[in-house]
Image (spheres, rainbow, N blue to C red):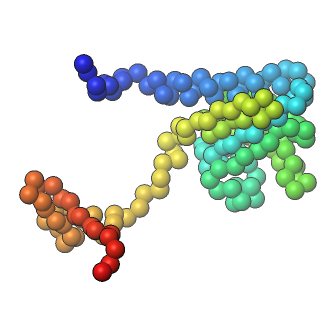
Amino acid sequence: MMTDTPDSLIPYDEIVQEALRAVVGRVLGQIVDTGGTLPGTHHFYITFKTAAPGVSIPTHLKERFPDEMTIVLQNKFWDLTVAEDHFSVGLSFNQVPAKLEIPFAAITAFVDPAVDFGLQFQATVADLAPEPHDDAENDAPEGTDGPSVTTEDGSNVVTVDFGKRK
């Protein structure tokens, strides 16, 4: 019996993430269609990557939340609009009104605590990859000035014992 799962040539994870983000768009679209008021006790927590392409938020919010931000749509929001790939909304931060535009691809979480519903997303934006950094000084390849220990099987392995000192 085969125990290894072959790599898929179909990007199922991406397709599922895109479909789940469409759920967020559909829910927000229904709010727009019903006059912009949330029914009953529903309210939404939406978390998104502030550095994602297409995100438009005021500079002071970008400085305060350089990586990720959560907004709450409950009582005081306005001008909610939903497009195929993003939504925009007006919110107040410390009594200062602001307009936010958020692509669905930037969303990392959507929660409606009134009905215990939540979705988590993986960041799908290539531009959010970790920033490049210098190589560690101890990671030099064999034959260079960096440290290297070769074991009997030819691999570069260093064993460190963090046991108690005597």
Q: Please identify the quarter of the rendering in which residue 65 is found.
A: bottom right
At 22% from the left and 64% from the top, the residue drawn is: 158
156 to the left or right of 77: left
> In the displayed structure, would residue 130 be above or below residue 85?
below
* Quarter placement of the C terminus: bottom left
> Can you name the residue that lies furthest to the left here?
152
In the figure, 120 relative to 18: above or below?
below
Q: Quadrant of residue 60?
A: bottom right
Q: Residue at x 76, y 52 (%)?
A: 58
Query: Which quadrant is home to the N terminus?
Result: top left
Q: Nearer the viewer, residue 134 or 137?
A: 137
The image shows residue 123 at horizontal and vertical percentages of: 55, 40
Q: Position of residue 3 (x, y in %)?
A: 28, 25
Would you say residue 33 is visible in this rendering? yes
Give the percent coordinates (x, y) of residue 161.
28, 68
In this picture, residue 163 sits left or right of residue 37: left
Is residue 87 something one can see in this rendering? no
Tell me what residue is drawn at x 50 percent, y 28 percent.
14
Lateral position of residue 18 relative to residue 126, left or right: right
The residue shown at (77%, 35%) is 113
Name, please, the residue furthest toward the bottom. Answer: 166
> Percent x, y for residue 118?
68, 32
Count of marks placed on residues: 0
Question: Which image quadrant for residue 94?
Answer: bottom right
